[in-house]
Image (tube, grey):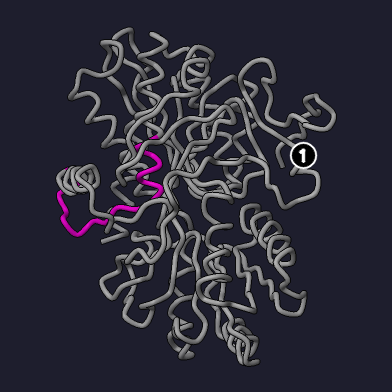
Amino acid sequence: MLKNTLSAFAAAALLFSASSYATDDTIKVGVMHSLSGTMAISESTLSQTVQMLIDEQNKKGGVLGKKLEAVVVDPASDWPVFAEKSRELLTQDGVAVVFGCWTSVSRKAVLPVFEELNGLLFYPVQYEGEESSRNIIYTGAAPNQQAIPAVDYLLNDLGIERFVLAGTDYVFPRTANKIIEAYLKAHGIADEDIMINYTPFSHSDWQSIIADIKDFGSTGKKTAVISTLNGDSNVPFYRELANQGISADFIPVMAFSVGEEELSGIDTTPLVGHLAAWNYFESIETPENQEFIDKWHAYTGDDSRVTNDPMEASYIGFNLWVKAVEKAGSTDVDKVLDAIVGLEVPNLTGGMAKVLPNHHITKPVYIGEIQADGQFQTVWESDGEVAGDAWSDFLEGSKDLEADWTAPINCGNYSKSQHKCLKQVSAQ
């Protein structure tokens, strides 16, 4: 079923890519998520989500009296292709905005293109921070909206004393783990009680790594895994945990990149009790969330399709863009960016998402336990929305920086000690 669904997405991508340039009656919207490759397990759903939101908006009359037209592309989980597709969307297709990317390496690949061509990207996935671009609105979680609260829960609520930081080998896990490691050491966790392991995308042979984790957790100290594994590596990872008898009671896993979509393809019975930190769960009961779920089921024609956190971030980002365009009276990027700071739209969990001067948003934080049905039961939540922080308070060189894209600062890396914007470092 997944293969057929992805094939349909790829066909849609070719259809939309071949469409004509925008007319005076339409506004083109770029949709840039992988429909093939290792990240398709996560990203293909976001492509379909944005197309659903575009259809919904068109039923309301579009934006500024014009219909929205989706231009769907497939970067195929290939980071250089993300850059190529973003340039095509901005220069050839003439899109007014792009909703896209999942991994930080894909975002880093397209960032110079959006800044060079003054494009606008809404990025819907949790990330490592340490960045604030004028041309990106970050609707996913910054570390202080996911990683830090999750570590606090492990330390304070579960009494964890040893930590395994297991990640896919790219920007987000390495930077996030750098922040987490500094935070753990500041809270008295010794070097020997921190184990760090990275694996490539699509890694499938977990037997020896899981055995090492099991051995690391057998010293008598309470141990947990903080997982920043991405994409289809999660399926064999969790399967091997179960094979080696690692239950949540023995070594709980706190995941930052595993949601309802990733769990829908595996037997979750052995994973009951393992954890994830997000800003949204499908199981949260609010009228707004139920309405969204019903629309998703109707759009896909499949009541078994789940929702997840990056879908909500896409929903928030899309609605913020529409509201900013309507406020600005234009899709011009400069005018939209001037209009968007301070705007608020409802999230799906009963609160409001507000765009901050650093181009991040306010988000609640939830920690959930995996249930046998693949859903999450919330075991902890923040006291209201948390403001996203672009720069970590726990890294030297970052704690002095502030991002503010409003006057008089108007930059993403303002040094509070030097009282000036620092020279921008090119995205890597």
Whether residue 26 is situated above or below residue 57 in the rendered picture: above
Residue 36 shows in the view? no
Q: Name the residue that disc number 1 marks.
A: 400
Whether residue 407 is situated above or below residue 305 in the rendered picture: above
Q: Where residue 144 sits: x, y (%)?
A: 58, 50
Element type at marker 1? Answer: loop
Residue 406 picture quarter: top right
Q: Where residue 105 sits: x, y (%)?
A: 61, 47
**Which amino acid type corresponds to the residue marked 1 in the rendered image?**
Asp
Identify which residue, 23 or 382, lies in the foreground: 382
The answer to whether residue 280 is left or right of residue 252 is: left
Q: Give the range drawn in magenta.
A: 299-316
Identify which residue, 320 or 287, lies in the foreground: 287
Whether residue 210 is situated above or below residue 166 in the rendered picture: below
Residue 43 shows in the view? yes
Which residue is drawn at the image coordinates 66% and 72% (left, top)? 197
Q: Where residue 329 sits: x, y (%)?
A: 38, 8
- Quarter holding the N terminus is bottom left
Which residue is drawn at the image coordinates 49% and 20% (left, top)? 92
- Quarter holding the C terminus is top right
Bin the neighbour count of mark 1 within 10 Å (Cα to Cα): few under 14, some 14-19, many 20 and up.
some
Q: Is residue 320 magenta?
A: no
